[in-house]
């Protein structure tokens, strides 16, 4: 008699009920994660559902703060309240989870490296699985017992909830990053307006005031039959300087060549007066206005950084369109210099605002700037199908 195949096998009724219960539990948590509620509520709910699936065992989410410390961030029934931070040693349960990036089981903490760590909380046994964020071990999802070793099914069941924990934390961090990015964009816009106002007031406006005063004095001198030539010359000089300052200011906002002739012409005008030699390698057609504007400011910021901070001897600016109309096109820009390097977009420089601007267009910014090895600023900005370029 042949052995029955897999189709003839049936699961016990209790096992089917458990699997259905577990599936419903995971669905409830997944729905809560997708609702983007407060992170504390979501993580606590995950712990509660996991505890229910583990027969009421204590469940805790812990975050790795450093190589030798963890902080409890959420729990259900666990002896370690949220907010408690604890140091751990080599060979301890958290250390092994962090270093192996795999589930770890301890059936009895007596004699373990972290026996003193768990003793105040009355924990005898525990199972922990890692929580990954962007490929790194962010923390761990732990079930504990005060009386006996945990059942063998704990690891696989915890793993499912650990994945939901990852999704919840990733959602929260993404929302926080977006909020910070929006705040930086708003702050940068406010600062740009203040800078324009200050530059106009302290520069061109003062020159025009002097020109007006000189012209009034010239008029009075002419009424008296005097020579107004020097005063007119003074007024003309102030008016010309005001015009130059306003032209430079407008160029810094949005150059006329960009709006008239496109990105390549705008970049060409940008680097025309650059004190550092610039090699241009541009093969860019007319693009939608917001793409051209984003690309222009990308190059302008990178060139400004190279001139002001990198002490570069030469700068290379390249740009091209890759892809086709069916799969979508991408504007690829690169600004390279041979300067001192060490640029960091995370230190609150203009590159941070630039990254926010590019992200607003669903693009990406990469800064490669090893100390002493020059800097390369690379940007990829998608051009969506259906977007039209100026005539």
Image (spheres, helix red, strand yellow):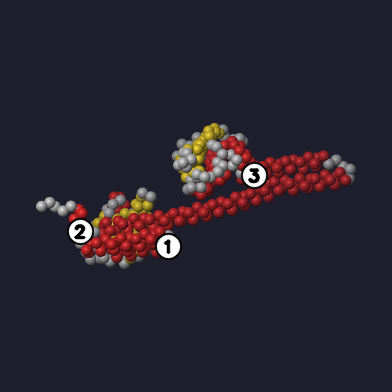
**Which residue position holds label 1?**
38
Circle 3 sits in a helix, a strand or a loop, which is it? Answer: helix
- Residue at mark 1 to residue at mark 2: CA–CA distance: 42 Å
**Which residue position holds label 3?**
250
Give whichever of discs 2 and 3 has the lower sequence position.
Answer: 2
* Residue found 25% across the figure and 59% down from its top: 154
Q: Is residue 253 above or below residue 318?
A: below
Confirm whether residue 305 shows in the render. no
Give whichever of discs 1 and 3 has the lower sequence position.
Answer: 1
- Image-quadrant location for residue 22: bottom left
Q: Nearer the viewer, residue 228 or 42?
A: 42
Query: Which of label 1 and label 2 is nearer to you?
Result: 2
- Image-quadrant location for residue 109: bottom left
**Which residue position holds label 2?**
10
Give whichever of discs 1 and 2 has the lower sequence position.
Answer: 2
* Residue found 45% across the figure and 42% down from its top: 327
């Amino acid at each position: 008699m042949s052995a029955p195949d897999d189709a003839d096998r049936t699961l016990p009724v209790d096992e089917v009920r458990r699997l259905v219960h577990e599936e419903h539990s995971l669905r409830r948590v997944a729905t809560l994660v997708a609702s983007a509620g407060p992170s504390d509520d979501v993580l606590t709910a995950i712990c509660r559902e996991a505890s229910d699936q583990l027969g009421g065992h204590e469940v805790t989410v812990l975050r790795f703060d450093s190589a030798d410390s963890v902080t409890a961030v959420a729990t259900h029934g666990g002896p370690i309240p949220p907010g408690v931070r604890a140091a751990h040693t080599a060979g301890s349960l958290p250390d092994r989870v962090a270093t192996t990036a795999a589930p770890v089981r301890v059936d009895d903490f007596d004699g373990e490296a972290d026996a003193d760590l768990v003793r105040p909380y009355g924990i005898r046994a525990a199972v922990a699985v890692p929580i990954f964020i962007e490929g790194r071990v962010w923390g761990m999802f732990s079930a504990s017992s005060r009386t006996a070793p945990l059942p063998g099914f704990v690891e696989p069941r915890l793993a499912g909830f650990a994945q939901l924990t990852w999704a919840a934390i990733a959602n929260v961090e993404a929302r926080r990053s977006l909020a910070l990015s929006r705040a930086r964009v708003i702050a940068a816009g406010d600062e740009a307006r203040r800078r324009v106002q200050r530059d106009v007031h302290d520069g061109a406006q003062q020159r025009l005031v002097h020109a007006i005063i000189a012209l009034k004095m010239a008029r009075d001198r002419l009424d008296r039959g005097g020579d107004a030539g020097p005063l007119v010359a003074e007024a003309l000089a102030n008016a010309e300087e005001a015009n130059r300052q306003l032209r430079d200011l407008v160029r810094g906002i949005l150059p006329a060549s960009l709006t008239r002739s496109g990105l390549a012409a705008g970049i060409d005008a940008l680097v025309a007066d650059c004190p550092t030699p610039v090699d241009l390698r541009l093969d860019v057609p007319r693009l939608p206005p917001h793409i051209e504007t984003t690309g222009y400011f990308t190059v302008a910021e990178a060139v400004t950084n190279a001139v002001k901070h990198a002490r570069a001897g030469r700068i290379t600016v390249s740009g091209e369109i890759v892809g086709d109309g069916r799969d979508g096109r991408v504007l690829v820009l690169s600004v390279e210099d041979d300067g001192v390097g060490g640029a960091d977009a995370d230190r609150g420089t203009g590159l941070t605002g630039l990254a926010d601007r590019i992200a607003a267009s669903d693009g990406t910014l990469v800064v490669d700037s090893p100390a002493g090895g020059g800097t390369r600023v690379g940007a990829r900005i998608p051009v969506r199908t259906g977007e039209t370029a100026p005539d």
